[in-house]
Amino acid sequence: MTDEVHFDVRVQAIDTETSSVTFGTVDGGTIQRQFSGRSYWKLDDVGVLHILEEGADFRFHAYPDNRLRRVPSDDTPEDGLWAWRLEGAEDVIYSIKAGIIPGKDCRVIVDDSESVSLRVPREFLDLCETYRLTPVELLQGFIADLCELQNYVVCPREDGLSSHGSDERGLANEWLQRAHAWRLDASE
């Protein structure tokens, strides 16, 4: 058995006494699940429901924009794109990288990255191994900090890159200034 994924489900009821939540599906059915702890959902939240393989555990993620709707009939799997629309705007379809849930007003930052190839010394590979990171993960993390990339829920990035925080952004930019600021002056 694989995980079940249901898009565009709506929170219909939350019973805190029995710790149960009822979701309405697009086909008019309902799915009820028990939850533990505190529920952060609100009535009428719309989102994606993942029922994990075991059948009992689940994850519900409310969409950042309650008007978002999946349009699987307009997906282009050969290009790796999912189709989305905003409720009330059926004539406008947004093609977004598969797996990405768009943000407010169906916004995303489109992946316009380019591949580069570079040789790295053994010491760098050893450093990556020490931190249990791949060279790609380490370099992409540094690039995200250096370029101050933010992957916000309201406007997610298709490339998935996101800074590690304001301190990390500041330190990465401080390194750039210390190591290469002289190049700015040389270009004038």
Image (spheres, rainbow, N blue to C red):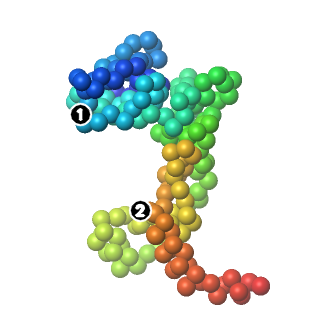
Residue 92 lies, with reference to residue 176, above or below; the image says above
| Dot placed on the residue nearer the N-terminal end, 1 or 2 | 1
Q: Quadrant of residue 32?
A: top left
Can residue 44 be seen here? The reply is: yes
Mark 1 burial class by Cα count in 10 Å: few <14, some 14-19, many 20+: few
Q: Could you give the CA–CA distance between mark 1 and mark 2, rounded to whole angstroms?
A: 34 Å
Image quadrant occupied by the N terminus: top left
Residue 112 lies, with reference to residue 69, above or below; the image says below
User: CB under 8 Å between callouts 1 and 2?
Assistant: no
- The answer to which of 23 and 96 lies nearer the viewer is 23
Residue 174 rendering spot, x and y as whole percentages: 53, 79
Q: In which quarter of the image is residue 173?
A: bottom right
SS for callout 1: loop
Residue most toward the right? 188
Q: What residue does disc 2 label?
A: 137
Q: Please state if 159 lies on the left or on the right of 60 as rendered.
A: right
Q: What residue does disc 1 label?
A: 36
> Which residue is at 60% across, 29% downward?
85
The three-letter code of the residue at mark 1 reads: Ser
The three-letter code of the residue at mark 2 reads: Glu
Q: Residue 109 carries which label?
A: none
Residue 67 rendering spot, x and y as whole percentages: 57, 28
> Which residue is at 23% across, 23% downward?
18
Q: In which quarter of the image is residue 57?
A: top left
> Which residue is at 64% across, 87% downward?
182
